[in-house]
Every structure is written in C-alpha cells, then in structure tokens.
Image (spheres, rainbow, N blue to C red):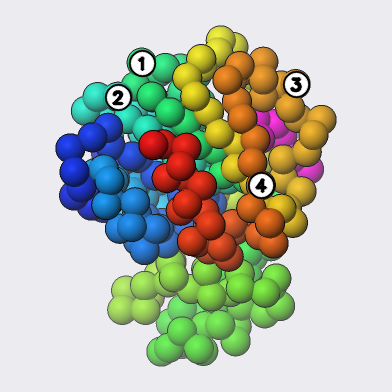
Amino acid sequence: MLNTVRYDGPTDVPLLIAHGLFGSARNWGVIAKRLSATRPVVAVDMRNHGQSDWQNSHSYQELADDLAQVLDGPADVLGHSMGGKAAMVLALHHPEMVRKLIVADIAPVAYGHTQMGPIEAMRRVDLDSVSSRAEAKAQLGDLEPGVDDFLLQSLDLKEKRWRLNLDVLSAEMDKIIGFPEVSGQFDGPTLFLSGGNSDYVQRDARPRIKELFPQAKFAKIPGAGHWLHAEKPREFEAAVTAFLA
C-alpha cells in the first residue's frame, strides 16, 4: 500500500495526485492544500519513493495498480510526468475508478532521454560524511538549475539515506522513460496540461493521445517548463480547478 497524505475538503469527488520521478507527496503539499478548498485531496508517494514500500520492479501497470488500491471509489486523478503515465494506465485499465483525468506535461509515448544523471549524482554523495543538505548539494555536482534542490527533498539526513530506491529506479529506467503497449480507451474528460516552454508533449503525439483518450483537450501554461506546477503554481492551480469544476 502506498503512503498517502490526505487533505480534508468539502464532500465531493476526491482528487488523487501522483507525483513524478524522484518526487514525493510532500512536493505537492501547497497545491494539494489549496485544491482541498473544494474537495478532499489525496497525494501519494509512488512505490520506491518517499515513505512508500520499496519493490523490486517499477512498471506502469504496477504503478497504476498501486494507485487503484488507494481509491475507495471513483476519483479525479492528476499525474505529473511519471505519475501522469501511471495515471493514464490507471484510467485505461480501471476506467470505472476515474471520473476526470489531468495529465501534466507528459504523453503516452516512449522518450529518448534518460534520467540516469540524477541517479548517478545521488550515488556520488558520501552519505556517511555529510551533515547538512548544503554539504550534500556540493557533492551532487553540476545538474540542471533547481534539480539539486529538488533531489535534496528526498534526502533523509538523520537516517543517512535517500528516500528513493536508486537501484531499482536505475534498473527499470527503460520502463520509466517508455510507455507500455496498451489497448482500449478512456472516454472521460481528459486534460493534457503542458508547460509552454516544455517539449514533452509534441504535436505528433496527439493522434495517439486522441486514440486512447477521445475527449482529450490540450492547454499550455505560458512561461512554464516541465515542472509547470512548481514554476507557475497559481496558474497551474487555476487550470486544474477550472477543468474539475
């Protein structure tokens, strides 16, 4: 069972939030709290992340099944990046459990890039020697702006460990950047919400998106990249609220 962080809200269809690779439920705390003004919100730690159990595999079918186990009934589902792929598989395989779907800056396609760089950076940190996040940050080396601070949110200084199963995430990286062969459709309302400066959802992916999600609509948040919810939180919250209303 996944670790969950729950935010009480008025009686309504709950919103389930699935974070991206190297993330956690706590990354979504501010947005989840704001969205709970209109409905209950449940943010999860995906397997091999945060406070959730470490498993020996990390496929999207398994991630989707994990999400299904959290739900007591139909919910609206929001997933970013890796969490967006898991949310899509959940909607396709368990459509009765999803009312509305929001996919944040990801498409149901395989990507050519890898995320091994951050894993290698985290492995470089001598956890036994660091006593502060600043020391750990210095050992992470050169990463894209903001990535080091994001990764450090998963560092447990007291326990001298990363709250990420780096070995399994590394071994399963091809699955994470890929997308499984799926069939069927999710006929519910679906929003593909992307950063205006991001290239993760290309126009040539739209035919496949519409094939799987016939009601899909597309929107962009100007000035935001892949981490659109962190870069433009107010605009992201407004777009999500408007779609769910």
Inspect the image, locate mark 4, and give the three-letter code of the amino acid beneath it: Lys
Say which label, 4 or 1, has the lower sequence index: 1
Looking at the rendered image, the disc whose residue lies closer to the viewer, 4 or 2, is: 4
The span from disc 1 to disc 3 (Cα, nearest Å) is: 24 Å
Q: Which mark is residue 74?
A: 2
Residue at the disc numbered 1: 96
**Left or right of 238 in this view: 76:** left
Mark 2 burial class by Cα count in 10 Å: few <14, some 14-19, many 20+: some
Q: Quadrant of the N terminus?
A: top left
Looking at the rendered image, the disc whose residue lies closer to the viewer, 3 or 4, is: 4
Inspect the image, locate mark 1, and give the three-letter code of the amino acid beneath it: Glu
Say what secondary structure mark 4 lies in: strand
Residue at the disc numbered 3: 207
Say what secondary structure mark 3 lies in: helix
Say which label, 1 or 3, has the lower sequence index: 1
Say what secondary structure mark 1 lies in: helix
- Segment colored magenta: 107-113
Image quadrant assignment for residue 2: top left
Residue at the disc numbered 4: 220
- Residue 108 located within the stretch drawn in magenta: yes
Say which label, 3 or 4, has the lower sequence index: 3
Inspect the image, locate mark 3, and give the three-letter code of the amino acid beneath it: Pro
Which of 168 and 79 lies nearest the eye of the viewer?
79
Q: Which mark is residue 126?
A: none
Q: Residue at x 44, y 70 (%)?
A: 153
